Amino acid sequence: MGIFYVFLVVVLLTAGIYLFSYVVKNSSLLFVLFIETLLGLLFIFPLLFIIDGLKAEQIFTSLTVKNWAWLAAAAIAGYIGGNYFSLLNLKYAGEKANSLLSPAITATALLAGYFVFEEHLSLKEWVGVLLTLLAVIYFLLQKQGTLKTLKLRSVFVSGMLTILFITLTIV
């Protein structure tokens, strides 16, 4: 059953990238973020009650002030920053380049875990992290021959900011 869920996630993420790409190229980024937020709440909120058995009073009473602060920071960094810059990258770079950001986010999160939480990385993991990051930077810079300088900077900067903001959310 686990393989089915992994396959389903990959299919849904792939479909999402192409759907978001179409929408983001034909409307404003903030409008897309607003609709994404609204639809996300409409679909996820009922699932909290049905699947997780959450009760209405638990929404605000089960979290401490410290938890709310961390949730707010994660929302600002990941959801607002990460999604905005990811959509911007999708708009400028397209689906192929944008799909490269996920492996880079994973590699950057491993690096952050090493430096922030002093987690151990084996030699194989270090090589994997470095190869992943170098490959993503290479492919993001590969667009140089086909893009104008301003657009190239937008692709590279939005890609790097997406990686940074989503990594901050993970860490």
Image: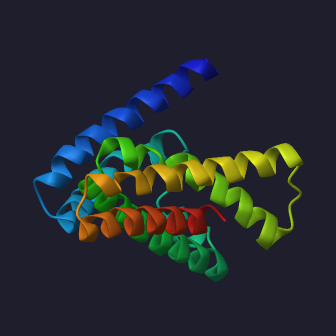
Image-based side of 31 in relation to 59, left or right = left
Number of numbered discs visible in the structure rendering: 0
Image spot of residue 3 (x, y percent):
60, 20
Taking the view exactly as shown, the residue that stands out farthest to the left is 26
Q: Quadrant of residue 2?
A: top right
Residue at 34% of width from left, 52% of height from top?
A: 143
Residue 88 shows in the view: yes
Q: Position of residue 168 (x, y in %)?
A: 59, 69
The image position of residue 80, as x and y in percent, is 39, 69
Q: Residue furthest front?
A: 145
Residue at 31% x, 68% y: name it.
154
Q: Is residue 61 left or right of residue 116?
A: left
Q: Is residue 28 above or below residue 105?
A: below
Along the viewing direction, whichever of 112 and 7 lies nearer the viewer: 112
Viewer-nearest residue: 46 or 145 = 145
Q: Quarter holding the N terminus?
A: top right
Report x, y in % for residue 30.
22, 68
Nearer to the camera, 3 or 148? 148
Residue for point 42% across, 57% down: 141
Figure colour scheme: rainbow
Give 123 or 105, whichever is nearer the viewer: 123
| Quarter of the picture holding the C terminus | bottom right
Residue 54 is at least partly visible in this image:
no
